[in-house]
Amino acid sequence: MKTQAFILLMLFGVTACLAQDKKVGGDCEGCEAIFESGVPFENLKSVTLLPDATWNNNKPLGINGTVFKADGKSPAPGVVLYLYHADQKGHYPKKGNEKGLAKKHGYIRGWVRTDEKGEYKFVTLRPAAYPDSTEPAHIHVIVKEPGFSPYYIDNFLFDDDPLLTDDKRAHLPNRGGNGIIKLIDVGNMYKASRNIYLGKNIPDYPF
């Protein structure tokens, strides 16, 4: 009974929060997953290690960057990013006890909240493309900034991915800015960076 009451209270809080947020970005299937964080937004760190990321027989990938406000130059603190992606075989792996949208997104997911400098970082293993697909390998990212509904931005894509053809590059919407990252081998891991620009190419976003 207490558990049910807690869940109802949490859902009520999320609903109340969304009611006050300005709707931007158009339809966003699965965006509500950003609210499934097991840690309250205000307690999220700016750095996270996604599940399965390990140095044991692997070279993880560390991605960092700065989130900027709509003016394109002021750092944006307190912005939450929800990240999820397929595994190294191109599947969204499940453990069997998933709840909510983890049933679809799998367990390789995580949340970060930008620090006072607007910076974020996460470490993971590079995902593979979906089996028997021409879609490039990617990392999904959903943004929740104060006062606005969650919205998706361009996936993280890999510059050296042969599936990322010139035609696909030319038709990227660049929501939040360019999502194509270039990996640098630093020995024990790969590193890459991407800056994110709030509101850029996001429908209904006020400037």
Image (cartoon, rainbow, N blue to C red):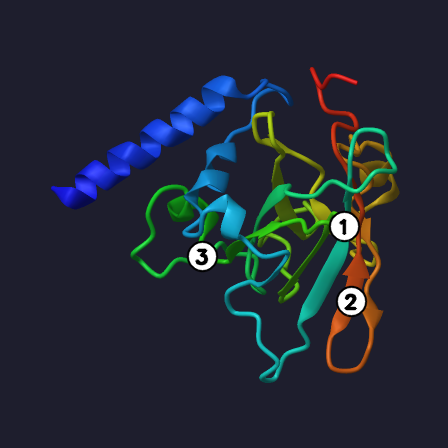
* Residue 102, image x, y percentages: 41, 48
- The correct choice, above or below, for 132 with respect to 17 in the image is below
At mark 3, the secondary structure is loop
Q: In which quarter of the view is residue 8 placed?
A: top left
Q: Residues within 10 Å of mark 1 (few under 14, many from 20)?
A: some
* Residue denoted by label 1: 117
Task: Check if mark 1's residue and mark 3's residue have beta carbons within 8 Å.
Answer: no
Tell me which amino acid carries mark 1.
Lys
At mark 1, the secondary structure is loop
* Residue denoted by label 3: 107
Tell me which amino acid carries mark 3.
Tyr
- The correct choice, above or below, for 154 with respect to 183 in the image is above
Tell me which amino acid carries mark 2.
Lys
In this view, which residue lies farthest toward the left?
A: 1
Q: Nearer the viewer, mark 1 or mark 3?
A: 1
Q: Which mark is residue 191?
A: 2
